[in-house]
Image (tube, coloured by chain):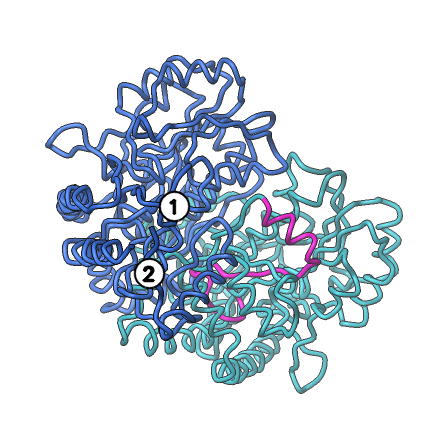
Chain colours: A blue, B cyan
Amino acid sequence: MALRAFTDQEAPLAAQLVALKAAAGSHSPSLLTIREELPDLEITVDACFISNPYATQLFLDYLKAELLDTGAIRDVLEFYPSQNQVIAAYIAGHLGIDTESVFVGNGAIEIIQAVIHSYASTRIMVTLPTFSSYYEFAAGHAEVVYFHLEKEREFRLDPEEYLAAVRELQPDVVTLINPNNPDGSYIPFDDIQAILAGLPEHVTAIVDESFIHFAFEDLNLDIRSIIGECQRYPNLVVVKSMSKDFGIAGIRAGYAVMSPDRIKQLLASGYLWNSNGLAEYFFRLYCREDFLQKYDIVRKQYILETQLFYRQLEKVPGIKTYPSMANFALVEILDGVSADDLMQHMLVRHGVYVRTCSDKVGLEGHFLRIASRGLRENQLIIDALNDVLSSAE
Amino acid sequence: MALRAFTDQEAPLAAQLVALKAAAGSHSPSLLTIREELPDLEITVDACFISNPYATQLFLDYLKAELLDTGAIRDVLEFYPSQNQVIAAYIAGHLGIDTESVFVGNGAIEIIQAVIHSYASTRIMVTLPTFSSYYEFAAGHAEVVYFHLEKEREFRLDPEEYLAAVRELQPDVVTLINPNNPDGSYIPFDDIQAILAGLPEHVTAIVDESFIHFAFEDLNLDIRSIIGECQRYPNLVVVKSMSKDFGIAGIRAGYAVMSPDRIKQLLASGYLWNSNGLAEYFFRLYCREDFLQKYDIVRKQYILETQLFYRQLEKVPGIKTYPSMANFALVEILDGVSADDLMQHMLVRHGVYVRTCSDKVGLEGHFLRIASRGLRENQLIIDALNDVLSSAE
């Protein structure tokens, strides 16, 4: 099968896109970069981009009322933000744990880098498919070995098989993302607990909960974070990005919960002023009841719309949509069309930007990762998918 | 000599201040922290804070016109900023060098941490007095040895003595801040060149030019950066904060210029998305002619006001003001009053916050570091100093 050929107008844009993607390595070029390099391309929906747009609006409303309308924004931009542990205290307040167990990062990505460089000294076991930084950042620090999730089992992780792999491969660090990126598979709370209980004490477990606010185990849509287990398991490091659930990727805010000893060690040689003024402002909101109540409404609204979107995706002919508890779904293209091709056609013909997974290690087949962007945008994604796929011949 | 005792009203505030400072370690508590912890204290001038307020206003004007009034701020906060080398390209454009020689940091502080952790493996030679992170971040990585600048010589660095110390102490990394923090002493361009020419090739030279925009060698007030020498000296790493000259400490923007090999090595295991959206926006301005022309005016205005301020400081009885090419001056209290005492009295009685140097390693005596904050504020600093010191008995 092949998609309808690009028109003479569309072809040059598609070629430029391929070049941009090649330059961005194992990640997608940012929207800003694409807009600047391809000004003729109109992007209607950025479904590469995995964040809750309603939460972004909530943050913008607070920002406008409290910083822009009051002029307080000047202080936020002009002065140094507070030190790591001052900001950690706000987060600890939100989580109901000790400040000494909280480490603030310049986005979760800085924390991933810091903990891999600090704790992976012999071998790191990474679950595949995954977010590529988990193995890329190990370069020069530790050997990387893999635990494969299989598409035939819809990427579900079996705790017993996982622990058997740990015994066999003997890593000093293991990484889990829950729900996993890019497939959205979810490890239930009880299974994570079983893994922690079965892991040798000397193995550091990095559990990345950056998408946990979108997952649920019953219809109350409650968040089931493993953070509460950090006190029981000093080998547990929970990493949390704020970019996805709060829709503020541009601010770079993240944190980790881990044993006070590990944090003391990290702070002894750096990470003192790694937050910016807006990140500090965000974390001050993060422990305010008024903000959190409003946030929980937009979180649940977004989950419901997201799950509705997945039901629509499941009905699109020519693709298989894998079950997801994240705010994106992994979609396999069944009829031989390549992921890069489908991505380019959706972007050039419909302005819908989806994440090709052609560069994802551990995914065999043609996969796209499609983010939920809210009711109206999700419908545009469905329409674009249906249109482009129906043109295949 | 002792300062007039605090009144019953002033005393509790002073005591709280001491506690806050103790909690902040070798750095000052931020203005935000003080405002929150001591709401009764009115801070009129923050002269701890070393940045050009006119440049802050210039940036705010651009931000308002281009991001706030247009609504483009949403994109900046919501989406991921570009990768390190995409932003490096803007800086390289400004500097007229190759992108491959530019490394972007989450503030200069992240770069200081990264280069010390990467290159200091045996011994690091730090010039004293200094910015404390230069030796603190070496903890667990390398032995720290010191090259002392002497107050009797007004902290001037002699290149030949410096090179002799390198031969004797055999460090693998040396650090220089030019102009130096906290004393403001300046190493002329020709002297830095002499040092670079005399350093063994295997010794990494970290030259921190975070205050170079305030220094000048003639009345044209031109900037004499050493960045142009990076191509000739692969052992040279030039670190540059944007916080001071552009007045945007809250944004966290910095960069370094060094050999492409070193940057490739750093990027191989991290630092991919270490900028936030506002930092990226700033660096886009940083290579725009319209912005740079306006910036150069406020830079020169600030230098002139700053040098005028130093002439006023020199006339205050009871203190000695050391020559400075930075935007702060180091002031020695001559009559036995301690720096902490003077700091507390100026803050509690006049709302003028100055940096006590009682925690600064390598400074013998009672020192304050006082930042230039613009004409009106500088006058308030002078008035407060005169008032508090004249009350000493």
In the rendered structure, does residue B253 fall within the stretch colored magenta?
yes
Q: Which mark is residue B16?
A: 1
The range drawn in magenta is B243-268
In the rendered structure, does residue A159 fall within the stretch colored magenta?
no
Instruction: State the residue position of label 2.
Output: A345
Circle 1 SS class? helix
Dividing the picture into quadrants, the one containing residue A118 is top right
What residue do we see at 74% from left, 62% from top? B155
What residue do we see at 45% from left, 64% from top? B280
Q: Amino acid at mark 2?
A: His
Q: Position of residue B296 (x, y in %)?
A: 55, 82
Q: Nearer the viewer, mark 2 or mark 1?
A: 2
Q: Amino acid at mark 1?
A: Gln
Taking the image as drawn, is residue B346 in sight? Answer: no
Q: Position of residue B202 (x, y in %)?
A: 82, 49
Specify whether A163 is left or right of A269: left
| Placement of the C terminus of chain A among the 4 image quadrants | bottom left
Specify whether B201 is left or right of B216: right
Dividing the picture into quadrants, the one containing residue A54 is bottom left
What residue do we see at 19% from left, 59% from top? A380
Q: Give the total of numbered labels.
A: 2
Chain of the residue under the numbered disc 1 shown in the image:
B
Q: Is residue A40 above or below residue A377?
A: below
Circle 2 SS class? helix
Near mark 1 (Cα within 10 A), the count class, few <14, some 14-19 or many ≥20, is some
Q: Position of residue A282 (x, y in %)?
A: 30, 51
Specify whether B141 is left or right of A250: right
